[in-house]
Image (cartoon, rainbow, N blue to C red):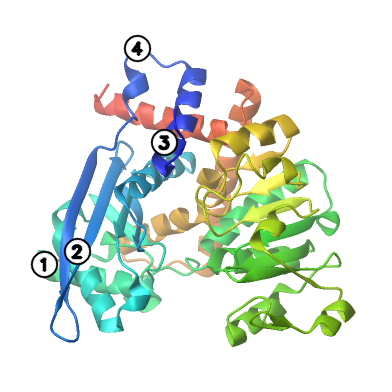
Amino acid sequence: MSTSTPFTRFQKTLHTVLQKIKLEDGQNTLFDDPQFVHKKDITIQSGNGSEKKFHAFRVQYNNARGPFKGGIRFHPDANEDEVKALAALMSIKTAVVNIPFGGAKGGVQVNPKHLTSKEVQEVAREYVKAFHENLGPDIDCPAPDVNTNSDIMAWMRDEYEKITRTYSPAMITGKPLSFGGSVGRDTATARGGFFILQEMVDRLALDPGDMRVAIQGFGNAGANMAQLLHQAGYIVVAVSDSQGGIYSQEGIDPIRISKYKSKTGSVTGEYCEGSVCDIERMKMDDVAKISNEELLELDCDILIPAALDNVLTKENANRVKAKYILELANGPTTPEADDVFEKMGTRVIPDVLANAGGVTVSYFEWSQGRSGEQWTDEQVDERLKRVMLDAYKAVRREARREHMTYREAAFAVGIKRMLDAMQVRGWI
């Protein structure tokens, strides 16, 4: 099977796992396609009076376990295949952490950086107008994704409530705190991954102070993870963003890096202005400038891809020196790279488990929206930790029992839970 697209990469892992868990006749095809693929063109008026048209999607993969759930991304490369793959992965992810949601994903083929704030708001509202019949707290509950944020979620909720003439704080998550959001949502992806990493390190009787970590991506998830690890005593040796990264075998201070990134727009901002770097100062601090590709192959113990998909491939997998890979990004590892890592004995904690903290706290926000309660930081943190560790233990058990990789085990746990729900509903 070709692995040239995100959806065929998902299918390759899916079919490998379906063969291993030996389903009944006819069940192997249950997950081949999404339940619904909604496609529409949305049109906005630009500032000069002309019209701008964009392709928009909402793919609803499976809702056996509860309402569809998944983010909406605004990106020029968003397309049906990518959104299908992400919806499928979200269905596995919600089942792995055992929250009562299915999986969906949305996208608008637009570069929001080329739009005014007013135009971005129009795109958000037009998206809801196009798909409102397929959305709702009991039908499909979206969330932020690439290039979307809490303001956009607020505009979408407002538009939905106008159209349906309802009060619906639970129809969308990732909202501002003042408009029905939840505390802890902004750090949830990193915290969820951190809880799992800590549990793995404890079980293997490793010392965090001996563990060197490289993090590709210094956005929300990567920057928060770097700070959590630094505070817990891990040695963060490298971080990067879209413009490159910095490496120091002695370790770097993520809090200082964050300050310079805020000030200069780059993690290398303390030492470099554009491509011009203060070499003497870097030598004095024992720091080197590195590329994103070099970061993946550094001599470290833990590698955390927290930015782009498809960065660990059959071309570079055998040069990865990390013993453990924790995927905070969606889909950073290709199936061919997984095969290489399995042969090398590299443990990969897959995205459908490692970055599920975000959707878990989205579930908490949905619950609070339905009940009218507001949880404290401590309540969110305690419940997130419990959900993530239960999921990790379920995947670890499955991996040991069935002699699977952690990715295969996570898929197996998710598929079995979805099948149980489908059987209860009488779908199979």
Contact? badges 3 and 4 (CB < 8 Å)? no
x and y percentages locating residue 242 in the rendered image: 57, 68
Contact? badges 4 and 2 (CB < 8 Å)? no
Q: Residue visible at 25% across and 74% down?
A: 155
Q: Which residue is mark 2?
A: 128
Q: Earlier in the sequence, mark 4 or mark 2?
A: 4
Q: CA distance from mark 1 to mark 2?
A: 9 Å
- Give the numbered dot on residue 8: 3
Task: Choose between 50 and 6: the one closer to the eye.
Answer: 50
Q: Which residue is mark 1?
A: 163
Q: Amino acid at mark 2?
A: Val
Residue furthest to the front = 275
Would you say residue 227 is visible in this rendering? Answer: no
Q: CA distance from mark 2 to mark 3?
A: 29 Å
- Under circle 4, the secondary element is loop
In what quadrant of the picture does the C terminus appear? top left
Contact? badges 1 and 2 (CB < 8 Å)? yes
Q: Amino acid at mark 3?
A: Thr
Q: CA distance from mark 4 to mark 1?
A: 44 Å
- Under circle 1, the secondary element is helix
Mark 4 or 1: in front is 4
